[in-house]
Amino acid sequence: MIDFSFQNPTRIHFGRNAMDKLPLELERYSKRVLLVYGGGSIKRNGVYDDVMNKLKQAQAQVWELAGVQPNPRLSLVREGIAICRKEAIGLVLAVGGGSAIDTAKAIVNGACYDGDVWELYEGKGNNETALPLGVVLTIPAAGSEMSRSSVITREEDLCKRGRNAYTNFPTFSILNPEYTFTLPPYQTACGIVDIMAHMMERYFTMVENVELTDRLIEGALVTVVNNAPIVMAKPDDYDARAEITWAGALAHNTLLDTGRIGDWASHKLEHELSALYDIAHGAGLAIMFPAWMKYVLPRGGAKKLAQFAIRVLGVPESLGSTEAVAAEGICRLEAFYHSLGLATTLTEVGIDESRIPEMAARAVGMAGGRLGGFVPLSPEMAEEVYRLAL
Amino acid sequence: MIDFSFQNPTRIHFGRNAMDKLPLELERYSKRVLLVYGGGSIKRNGVYDDVMNKLKQAQAQVWELAGVQPNPRLSLVREGIAICRKEAIGLVLAVGGGSAIDTAKAIVNGACYDGDVWELYEGKGNNETALPLGVVLTIPAAGSEMSRSSVITREEDLCKRGRNAYTNFPTFSILNPEYTFTLPPYQTACGIVDIMAHMMERYFTMVENVELTDRLIEGALVTVVNNAPIVMAKPDDYDARAEITWAGALAHNTLLDTGRIGDWASHKLEHELSALYDIAHGAGLAIMFPAWMKYVLPRGGAKKLAQFAIRVLGVPESLGSTEAVAAEGICRLEAFYHSLGLATTLTEVGIDESRIPEMAARAVGMAGGRLGGFVPLSPEMAEEVYRLAL
């Protein structure tokens, strides 16, 4: 175990009646509220009305910033900051998934920063404080509802930058699993893959003696694997949705990072895929993670992959060698992704090898020449991972 | 899963160099520091010197409140509050285990409360704020370093009261597993039992559909069970000490409460034992928990006890009926406690049945007539649990 510091101040209100806590939070912070959300889904599924009713009851003044898109954009962030400043907003409330939350994170930080908000994402500036940020979660996937990270895209040049900061932790997050009942199956599936990937990126570490966090991650992964088929078959199963919703928040809230260094190569390789092709992040991860596993298996990864296979996917230790057990684990993971209706190869989604060198170079370049903590990848090695995904 | 709210703001600095973070924390809060600790152990093992060196480097002004005892006392708390007020203390720093930390918690709250601090413990008053509280942990056991609870004893009538409050969460806690190397084996063993009991009290719940938290608890328990023999055999094994230290903080930091209701009967039954007899809390729990398990097994507890036996203690499911698997789990838990050098019966520690009715009546009376959430106990039932412990 390596030394670490850990703190997560986000207050979680979880459950069927979680929204009842919103008026209390408004009393605590402010009744001048900027609502940040995407398109029409929260209007169709009633979440927008639930929020507005609570805001009205509390006699809050509400400004709205709609139109958040996947890969949320800098221009909308700037719009939100301008509203915060002009209207003396005291609380920004994000309603949605990772994109709405990440936009709101950029707004609450940018509003308390004298320079341009993009400087924060370029690492050229810093803010000490941020406006209070509330979240009403509708998509368990990104984990942004309890995390310190935010990713924003500058649309002029499609430059995508992430920022990790203490002031990115939401002040409070409202998680009602019922709000996830109406998610399309594809989005539910992609969310499940993303949640598991957040756990697995942390799991695959070269740091030794991390039994506690290993076992916490394994327990969380098993829970997601067990509940995934239930929500796919029965989208309004409250109990299974609740397990996945809470797991999604814990997956990325930095607790599972304690004392270890994660890998994150699969995430970075997937980001390049999403940047060039129209593929959802979760769908891309279902392709890249097994490919990455196949690549690292014979390169020092067999032991940890075998542990994953045995403890998470129930592969019998008696199956054979460490390598055989590890390989069977990857096979079962792919089968699991298929059972969610997702592809596990680039070919299945119509992506060929033409841009592999470009993606590999960019992913490794962004990481400073070596990608990942488990088995550090050179550009050539990253290319091989992409080819294994074909 | 039931609805819940969760927040834990404590900042953890963990590892060999965790103490290096102390000067930063002093800069953040105050350099007028009240140091709260027990007897000579921190002077013998060098922790006192480590702390004083850091305080000196930071040019802090230090007041000392020594003499904290097990079952920490109200009079010392009042002394500490008086110092805080007279000297305008800006940070209280507890160095030690649960008793030092609980004393410091009472001080930081009492110093910001206009009435007498005992009113807070009687539930007759409340404080909105508290002084900043820092912790340097030397005994992983009580979990107070990351918890919202504090227990204080009024010595006049030996009235022991607990208080749970948001303002009880330490502001920061420094956890260096090396500081636990010199613990006597008996204290290490008692700490391990206490940590496991904090997990098990939460584990045994009648709330259904709590798979995620069940599996997190199981993973944490397995980790403690695996690392306990290592630290007993080799007290300066850093890695095993680290696993147990971090597990001890997570055991009681309220994360493992989310969405469920714990039992806590064994804790309450043990408190009565400690109050009447000179027995350490952990040693008492090693006796009361197995007895409680034997009592609840045929009274609705078999299924969960069997799950515990299989997943935590590796009892093969094929052993037989649910009841047989559950019983084997209890047997293995007792063997585990014996392996730590602890007794698992009252007889072994020289306690007879003479005061059982008195203890049962008090424990159940304090709980309002029914004790525990898993199988609620009447006074007569609580007596039977004590008798099973003989």
Image (spheres, coloured by chain):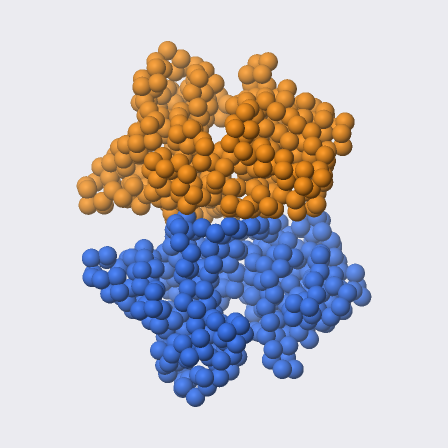
Chain colours: A blue, B orange
Q: Residue at x 49, y 64 (%)?
A: A141
Task: From the top left corner, tell me how far across and down residue B38 is, in percent.
Answer: 56, 25
Task: From the top left corner, tell me how far across and down residue B186 is, in percent.
Answer: 40, 27
Q: Is residue B372 visible?
A: no
Which residue is at the far right?
A86
Which residue is at the far top?
B354
**Residue B86 versus residue B108: which sits nearer the camera?**
B86
> For residue A185, which quarter of the picture?
bottom left
Q: Is residue A144 above or below residue B374?
A: below
Q: Residue at x 64, y 19 (%)?
A: B75
> For residue A342, which quarter of the picture?
bottom left
Task: From the top left corner, tell me how far across and down residue B65 is, in percent.
Answer: 64, 26
Q: Residue at x 58, y 32 (%)?
A: B48
Q: Is residue A370 visible?
A: yes
Quadrant of the drawing holding the C terminus of chain B: top left
Q: Is residue A331 above or below residue B204?
A: below
Decide if residue A169 is on the left or right side of residue B184: right
**Residue B5 versus residue A44: which sits nearer the camera?**
B5
Task: From the top left corner, tell me how far across and down residue B229 is, in percent.
Answer: 33, 37
Q: Residue at x 34, y 36 (%)?
A: B233
Which residue is at the far bottom?
A354
Total marks in image: 0
Q: Is residue B370 above or below residue A128?
A: above
Decide if residue B6 is on the left or right side of residue B196: right
**Residue A58 versus residue A104: which sits nearer the camera?**
A104
> For residue A95, which quarter of the picture?
bottom right
**Residue B241 versus residue B374: which sits nearer the camera?**
B241
